[in-house]
Image: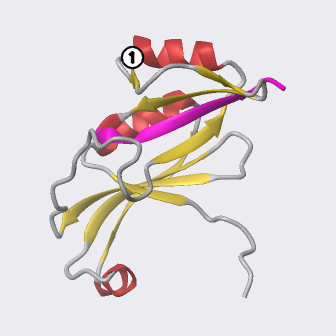
Amino acid sequence: MAIQGMAHVGMVVEDLPAATEFFVQLGLELLGEGQVEGDWVGRIIGLDDVRAEIVMLRTPDGHAEVELSKFLSPPSPDSDSHAPANAPGIRHISFIVDDINAAAAGLRERGTELVGEVENYKDTYLLCYVRGPDGIIVELAEKIG
């Protein structure tokens, strides 16, 4: 068996409209919204009585998709929306940008916090982390070398 490609990255959020707006403002394209429910979903994800709202987004190059899910049932367990970047689990998603300083400034204007600073990595990339709704960490990367 060999992986042929990546379908999408899924993230569970509490505030679906805020998370959707955050990713659209980053430049992702809204593909669609809907609701999933029923036994078939539960059999896939191992939960009973599943009902969730989902939003699908795509990067401008068409190569990556993000699925945002808001579970209506069963209730999601509490989480730490300010968990640090070294907490176990999937901690961030990374996007290539053409101007990291402009992207970071635009996010700051909308109230999004930088986790750290914009840094030069070996004169190949400018990198930074930002924290979006529900504690989602997004890495921005600008190729410079």
User: Would residue 139 appear left or right of 111 to someone viewing this image?
Assistant: right
Residue 39: quadrant of the picture:
bottom left
- Could you say where residue 4 lies in the image, as x and y percent from the top left? 75, 73
Instruction: Spot the residue most to the front.
Output: 122
- Could you say where residue 129 lies in the image, as x and y percent from the top left? 49, 31
Near-viewer residue (143 or 57): 143
Q: Is residue 124 visible?
A: yes
User: Would residue 25 appear left or right of 88 to someone viewing this image?
Assistant: right
Q: Secondary structure at mark 1?
A: loop
- Could you say where residue 96 lies in the image, as x and y percent from the top left? 68, 35
Which amino acid type is shown beneath numbered disc 1?
Answer: Arg
Instruction: Tally the numbered discs.
Output: 1
Q: Is residue 18 visible?
A: no
Residue 73: quadrant of the picture:
bottom left
Q: Which image quarter holds the C terminus?
A: top right
Magenta span of residues: 134-145
| Residue in the image at 36% along x and 86% along y | 40
User: Would residue 26 appear left or right of 19 to someone viewing this image?
Assistant: right
- Could you say where residue 48 lies in the image, as x and y percent from the top left? 21, 82
Residue 136 colored magenta? yes
Near-viewer residue (30 or 94): 94
User: In the image, is residue 40 above or below residue 70?
Assistant: below
Near-viewer residue (69 or 129): 129
| Residue in the image at 56% along x and 19% along y | 118
Residue 120 colored magenta? no
User: In the image, is residue 133 above or below residue 121?
Assistant: below
Q: Which image quarter holds the N terminus?
A: bottom right
